[in-house]
Each structure stands twice: as structure tokens, then as C-alpha cells.
Image (cartoon, rainbow, N blue to C red):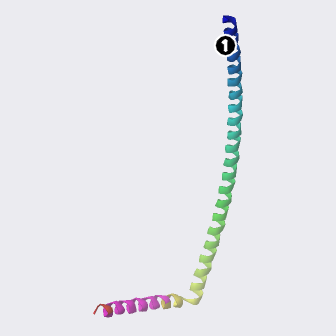
Amino acid sequence: MVPVIMKFIVERGEILNHGVSGLEAMCWITHKEVAQEIGTEAKFQNDFLNQLQMTLIKAQAGVKNNVRRLNKSIIQNGANNVVHVVLFALFCFFLVYLWSKMSRK
């Protein structure tokens, strides 16, 4: 009876050893796949950031050109439009001020 039990223990040990080796191999493959996926995602994020940076550079150039054009327009036409806007804002503020004073009484 003892040899049968020993044989069973030895067989179970071999099965367990084989099972552990198989799990180690599966874990190594899984780690490799995860590492490849992380590398792919890092490349994708890097490309996305590069495109975003190029878009930002183009937008800055566009804003700079529009400000330059606006400055030329103000110099050529004078600042009459700006004065009119400021006067209109002061007039509106004065009306709101008077309206608030009248409504309190």
C-alpha cells in the first residue's frame, strides 16, 4: 500500500511541477503581450501629442497674423471705432446707473 501512495505523490508532484511551469510560461507570454500593448499605446500617445503640438503652432501663427492685420487696420483707419465703442459702453453704464438709482426710490 505504501508504494502505491508514494507513486501517487510522485505523480501528483510531476503534475504540479508541470502545471507551475505551464503557468510560468503563460505569465511570461502575458507579460510580453502587456509590454507590447504598452509600447503601442505609448507610440499612439506620442503621435497624438505631436499632432496636437503642430495644431497649436498653426493656431498661434494664425492669431499672430490676425493681430498684425488688426493693428494695420487700426493704424490705417484710426482709432475712431474704438472711441465709439468706449463711448457707447460709458453711455450704457450711465443708463444702468440712473435706472438703479430711480428704482430704489
Determine the residue located farthest toward the left in the rendered image.
105
Q: Residue 89: horizontal and vertical position, in percent?
A: 45, 88
Magenta span? 85-102
Q: Main secondary structure of the magenta part?
A: helix
Q: Which residue is mark 1?
A: 9
Q: Secondary structure at mark 1?
A: helix
- Residue 9, magenta (yes or no): no
Q: Residues within 10 Å of mark 1 (few under 14, many from 20)?
A: few
Q: Position of residue 37 (x, y in %)?
A: 69, 44
Q: Position of residue 43 (x, y in %)?
A: 69, 49
Q: In the drawing, does residue 82 fall left or right of residue 1?
A: left
Closer to the camera in the image, 14 or 77: 14
In front: 63, or 101?
101
- Residue ID at (34%, 89%): 100
Q: Which quadrant, please, contains the C terminus?
A: bottom left
Where the N terminus falls, by quadrant? top right
Q: Residue at x 59, y 81 (%)?
A: 70
